[in-house]
Amino acid sequence: PLQLINVNSSYLYTLPLETFTGVNQSVLIYSAQQSSGLKLPDWLRFNGTTRQLSGRPNATVAGRYELALMATTPVGAQAVANFSLIAEYFPEVLQSIIPPLADINSAFSFTVPSNSFIDRDGDLLTYTAQRQGGSVLPNWLTFNRQSLSFSGVPLETDKGDLPLQIVATDPAGASVTQNMSIQVIHFPTLAHPQPTMTIRAGESFNFSLLPNIFTDSDQVGLSYSTNPLPSWLTFDSQTLSFSGKASSIESTSLTVIATDTRGASKSMSFQLVMRGNVLPIAVEEFLSNQAAKVGQTFSYFLPTPLFIDAHNNTLSYSASQQDGSVLPAWLHFDNESLHFSGTPGHGDTNFYSTRVVGVKVTAESEEGRASTSFNVNVDGMSWGELAVNIGAPLVSVLTTLYAVYEARALWLNYWRKKNYTLLENKNPTVTMGQRFSYNFEKVHNPELIHDIQAVIAYPEGRCCQFFRPRYKRLPGGNALPYWLKYDTHHHVLTGKVPNIDIRDSKKLELVIQAKDEAGIILEQFTLKILKPEKDISDFDIKELKVLSGPPEKEEKYEKDRLKKKNQRKSTEEEKAAIELMPLDELKVQSPTSVTKPLIEIKKLSEKNLSRDDSVHIPVKNNTPPSQKKQLSDLGSQSITSMGSKSPIPERAAEGDSKKEKGIASYFRGCW
């Protein structure tokens, strides 16, 4: 028989005993040579005892050899068996075949790669395919030996792995086998085709593929990729979105590929169309502002033509607020008739002011968009104003009732038994910078009332007072000033008035009121604050000017002032007074005849003297000031500040101005 030896592979062949018959095999002598009578080649040896032919040919001795095996009997009888031996390269597997995937109910086609096998002798190989184990292929699958391709349509019943083997054979009959398999599965499917997308050249864009555009019935994970993209276009495989900025107007075709974890894939292609970006133009960049009234129907038609398009593209219209948000709920826009309409309500305007609604109208074509804007001024009564208009009369009524309720104290106090002592003077005074103390004593067997409290009043308006519990406040009261204290145990009102600005009239007088536990006003009196008197000699006064006096004296004073000032002789004390003011003019000026401040200090040095200061002018026969009145006692009542009152200017002159020159020595006025 023909023997095949693979180059560079060991060869061993044992001659079967039944090769020669008719004699006793044990007495036969075996030998081998080439059929031509030449001895065997050097790489080939024959063992007559074991009948084995062996060797290892290399590429240099590859070829076909015709051999003769001879059997000789002891008497010289001989028989010859001829056979051929070929030393060559056997076919080899060069590359393993990657298992192909077959989609159920879809046409399957797979070609075995040409580099799967190789024959180093250059022999033409032939191929066969079968199931592993040698059985034939399934009915749905066929194999083309010429093109080395499989084809067929697998069914649902064929799902799974199909193990196969391919045999490559050379002309001499040497062969090699390679195993492979076909995976029959469900491929991803395209659920929704992607429509053509249009973008504008030179304009940034971003769009996403349709959601769930691919599905996989085997429920395995999908990954996404695309065909090579232009440099200005990017694809996000996580969000399935394209973005970029086209630099030209060339359309392009895009392919998106969905691949599952097994390698099965499905592709989808769509067109990306570029258009030139020729924008519509607004005829009027800013429209005239419009006015709307709360509770009244608003209507406004946009003027036409509002936009023009150079390419005569169809324009679509939309409206929003100028910040991009949607229009207010009351305002509607018809994009066909370009009509705004609606009725604003009380909540669509501002409290006591007009609400401005900025409206932006946008026209869009296939190539671009443009906008124009205007304002709608919504005027009318807001909910807050409506509440005030309704609530104000109600509050006024309640306030009036409250005032009546408060005024009951006047009537009750008139009939109430007095269990406190009034001040001797209802207008006591205290001097700024001087400490004072007033005692308040209860009468015998008084009714049970609360002690006086230092801070109990609240300075809110009547509306707020109306809703505050009565026991916590005094009507219209303020807190006592920090310099005024009341000792609730000893019933003593003490304090020291600080040097406050006398021109601030709110700090000149304090109204103190008392109340019992029911909160009824019992009495009130005024605590008046006076500025301390100042000696005119404490100041270096350069000039005094008489502002007003008796009419018959004013002209004479103006003419004789300098003359009298230079002629008068007196003591040093009198001289100081003369330099300040002529005494013969001063003596006829009394508090009852003068209604304005008499003098004004024009020039001062070293120390300041206010127009509101009380000034003591020292001259001869000086009469001391009158004695101040003392406060009497007040029973144990609650005290609080009632606010401020403007001071009453007070002027006094002591002495006999008619009998003696310079008698008007004490003058107090508002300077």
Image (spheres, helix red, strand yellow):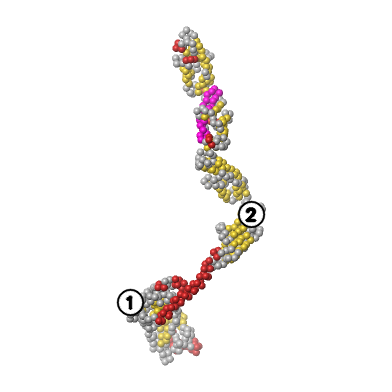
Left or right: where 583 falls relative to 281: left
Q: Quadrant of residue 636?
A: bottom left
**Residue holding disc 1:** 490
Q: CA distance from mark 1 to mark 2?
A: 92 Å
* Dot label at residue 208: none
Question: Is residue 590 visible in this depiction of the protein?
Answer: yes
Left or right: where 365 falls relative to 9: right
Amino acid type at circle 2 is Leu
Give the overall secondary structure of the magenta segment. strand
How dense is the environment of label 1, judged by Cα within 10 Å: few (below 14), some, or many (20 and up)? few
Q: Is 179 within the magenta?
A: yes
Could you say which is closer to the camera, residue 484 or residue 465? 465
Tag 1–tag 2 contact (CB < 8 Å): no
Q: Is 472 within the magenta?
A: no
Q: Residue at x 53, y 35 (%)?
A: 157
Relative to 274, does residue 571 appear above or below in the rendering?
A: below
User: Which residue of the protein is positioned furthest toward the bottom in this rendering?
Assistant: 659
* Mark before the other along the chain sequence, 1 or 2: 2
From which residue to which does the magenta span run? 160-183
Q: Residue at x 51, y 72 (%)?
A: 393
**Residue holding disc 2:** 315
Could you say which is closer to the camera, residue 568 or residue 577? 577
Amino acid type at circle 1 is His
Relative to 382, does residue 252 appear above or below in the rendering?
A: above
Residue 604 spot, x, y in % from top left: 44, 79
Residue 261 spot, x, y in % from top left: 50, 40
Residue 557 spot, x, y in % from top left: 48, 88
Q: Residue at x 42, y 78 (%)?
A: 409
Residue 562 spot, x, y in % from top left: 47, 86
